Amino acid sequence: MIKVAIIDDEQDSRNTLRLYLNELYQDIEVAGEADDLETGLALIKSTNPDLVFLDINMPDGSGFDLLERLPHKNINVIFVTAYDQHAIRAFRYSAIDFLLKPVDPEMLVKAIEKFRKKVDFSSLQQRLMTLLANKNTPKKIALPTTGGYKFVLAENIRHCVSEGNYTTFFLYNGEKILVCYPLKEYEELLEGDNFYRVHQSHLIHLKYVKEYKKGEGGSVILDDNTEIQIARRRKEGFLSAMMNYGS
């Protein structure tokens, strides 16, 4: 039996989540609920749950505050949030699952499936520690691989290429990493870290731009001599981003 704790200040949200869990799973037991950080911390310590559904914004602090106060970091967390895009961006860097309110049962099922494919303790601890370290100004992302996760500094990503629902990351050292998520996910993730999407299929780091070639949309030459076409409608935005890079 999988023990679950729900920590959320909204009664309706807790009720909905509990209802779905009870209806969809016979091997999941809601061990307890809490509506703030203090009772949530006590709940985790007393029930030692296998999985915690944790709200981001609560009256007495954030879900991140609760995690920082835990004596041990070996805890499986699925975040639940209504609107906090900055929080979503932070925990996506650490590849921890999340649900948007109101909770969609299909998304809940997918999150539970990911939980069942549990990573080992050391990997889980590393993900959570990375999350806490980067929650304000994240500079590192976790790329899912067949063996776990590869943590990569954003500044070391030269460019990303879309291949349907897959994205290939090209690193400054020549390494390539293929992940099974669309480019849009990473465009949002890397927003604000000097990346620009010059084409539907290409996201580049402005740091590695060596040259711009004129044309209908033009093209960009990276420092490894990779040439990438720029979509006509993205040309003006790209040139503006380059002019303001580093300022």
Image: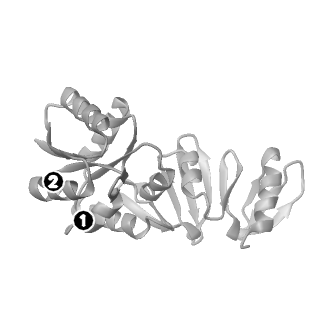
Colouring scheme, one of rainbow, by chain, secondary structure, one colour = one colour
Q: Position of residue 85 (x, y in %)?
A: 50, 50
Farthest front residue in view = 59
* Residue at 21% from the left image edge and 54% from the top image edge: 40
Distance between mark 1 and mark 2 Cα atoms: 15 Å
**Which is nearer the eye, 137 or 112?**
137
List the residue tagged with mark 1: 73
Crowd around label 2: few <14 · some 14–19 · many ≥20 (10 Å): some
* Residue 75 screen position, x and y as percent: 23, 58
Which of 167 and 7 lies nearest the eye of the viewer?
7
Numbered tag placed on residue 43 in the rendering: 2
* Image quadrant where one finds the C terminus: bottom right
Q: Viewed as shown, does residue 243 lie left or right of 113?
A: right
Q: Quadrant of residue 69?
A: bottom left
Q: Residue 4, how many percent across, how many down?
A: 18, 45
| Residue 241 in sight | yes
Q: Quadrant of the N terminus?
A: top left
Q: Nearer the N terminus, badge 1 or badge 2?
A: 2
The residue at 31%/41% (across/down) is 10
Viewer-side residue, 233 vs 168? 233
Is 4 on the left-hand or right-hand side of 173? left
Q: Secondary structure at mark 1?
A: loop
Q: Amino acid at mark 2?
A: Leu
Q: How many labels, in total?
A: 2
Neighbour class for label 1 at 10 Å: few (<14), some, many (≥20)? Answer: some
For the point 37% across and 66% down, the residue is: 132
Q: Is residue 4 above or below residue 39?
A: above
Q: Which percent across, then down, holds residue 172?
A: 60, 70
Could you tell whether 219 is left or right of 61 in the image? right
